[in-house]
Image: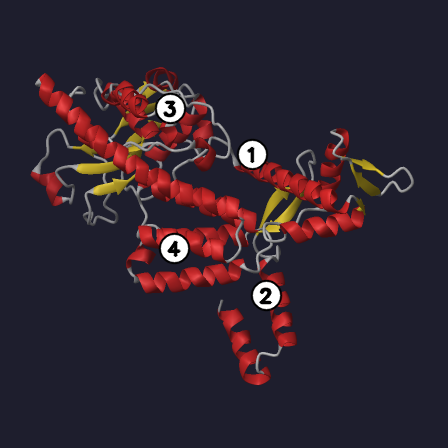
Amino acid sequence: MDLFNRFSSIIEESFHNDPSFLTIRDKAYQRLVNDTSFFSVKMPDSVRGAVKRLESRCPNLLAAFCDMLLRKSPTSRRLSSDEIMTRLKKILLVLKYVNSKDLFMEAHKAHLMRRLILETSADSELEELMVEKLREVGMPAELVNRLVRMFQDIKVSHDLTHEFHEKTKNNNLAAGADSLSGFLSSEMISIKILSSGTWLPRTLPKVSMALPPELEDFIPQIEDFYKQKHQGRQLIWQHHLSHGLVIYSPPQPTNHMEANGQPPHVELEMTTLQIVVLYAWRHRDFDQRLRLDSLLTATGLSDLELRKTLWSLSERPKMEQQIILYSPEVASEKDFTNETEFWINPSFGVCRSGRPPNRRRVNMIGRLQLTQTGCEEESLAIVQLRQLRVQEAVVRVMKIRKRLPFIEVYQQVICLLKDQFIPSKKMLKEVLEWLIERRYIERDSQQIDTFVYVS
């Protein structure tokens, strides 16, 4: 942005904003932000192709910076709302020159999902204002409308949670009971009913796990409550997106612990998977050592999910003493074996360099995992979505023009999709072959590189 402003000032002061110089500035800046020499990411060239091409990471970096400004972070805390909005406008200005705007929208949506689910937005008004700004700068209406529906789902879920609290409170009073789940009351439960088509790119497989009984008891209550309000709708639980607050109190607090800065209790913000792992020691001594196969049985998690969750509890960078200890030492979660033993460290600490913690709440969630897929699968999903966009664009062009050579088809498709991404010629050729097989278009009998729309 400093570079852009510097040259803009030069053009204004020396050339009085001459259009030719402004055009040169725009072309140079577009080339800069889309350059792959310094920061790049490998994306599949097509769905079926094994060849990958480099694309600029600028869209992902812009989305990450936007997330830093909009979520509760040290950066957003020291800035006023006006200062945050000024920086967001600068992000939108840079975004104007980005070729792969669809990558920004996917990354921005993922960050927004985390902020809304974890309730870490610094300012809800700024969140909604940012979405409207994306609409104003020309982002696809379909993608922007999905972001709007996400806010609507959160507001509806807030109202549902309030109604659920009131209903269970009245039912419990009528039954003469405080709660149906022991010490966990309904007021501690927050419900989020999210539209799968809006929040998730596709239907995800259900993550199996052995929920603690205190949570399991509420599921049928919530389902019955929701079915009474919405007949015919089905709830699919995505427990890997859920989180909770675990309060840990030392079994025998001592003056020595308090002198070292250990508070009488610590509040741990955790994912449901992390809570499930800790509950494996619910009726065991903390120092009892459990092997990997025992934890698989106790938690009901898959081997992959269990390994990642154990690693998040035993190798948290900000923890001076980890919550879970293991032996022998390994380099990563992939090196855990059935010989590895795990146990809870009751004297875990959040202080660093011998200094007491300023807060009793510790965030163990980090970056909430929204999907079970890796980077390659996510990249492939983006390419598949791009292919659908190209299919729509080709059919739209051919329906109007009826007959076009390949080079003109390519130019017309780029003209339609330039605000989202620039498709490769290889992807376009695959799409054309797909449309020929399904009789949407056909090759001209006289000129093989010319395509004709089939009405």
Q: Quadrant of residue 398?
A: top right
Q: Amino acid at mark 4?
A: Leu
Q: Amino acid at mark 2?
A: Tyr
Q: Amino acid at mark 3?
A: Leu
Q: Secondary structure at mark 2?
A: helix
1 vs 4, front mark: 4
Q: Secondary structure at mark 1?
A: helix
324 and 163: which is toward the camera: 163
Marking on residue 377? 1
The residue that mark 3 highlights is 235
Q: Determine whether, in the image, residue 441 is placed left or right of residue 160.
A: right
Marks 2 and 1 in Cβ contact (< 8 Å): no
Identified at 61% across, 36% down, the residue is: 384
Going from N to C along the chain, the mark reached first, 3 or 1, is 3
**Is residue 346 among what the camera can see?**
no
**Is residue 276 among what the camera can see?**
yes
Q: Secondary structure at mark 4?
A: helix
Marking on residue 29? 2
Marks 1 and 4 in Cβ contact (< 8 Å): no
Residue 140: x percent and y percent? 54, 49
How far separated are the C-alphas under marks 3 and 2?
Answer: 47 Å
Q: Quadrant of residue 437?
A: top right
Q: Amino acid at mark 1?
A: Glu
Going from N to C along the chain, the mark reached first, 1 or 4, is 4
50 and 229: which is toward the camera: 229
The residue that mark 4 highlights is 129
How far separated are the C-alphas under marks 1 and 4?
Answer: 32 Å
Image vertical order of residue 112 relative to residue 86, above or below: above
How far separated are the C-alphas under marks 2 and 4?
Answer: 26 Å
Marks 3 and 2 in Cβ contact (< 8 Å): no
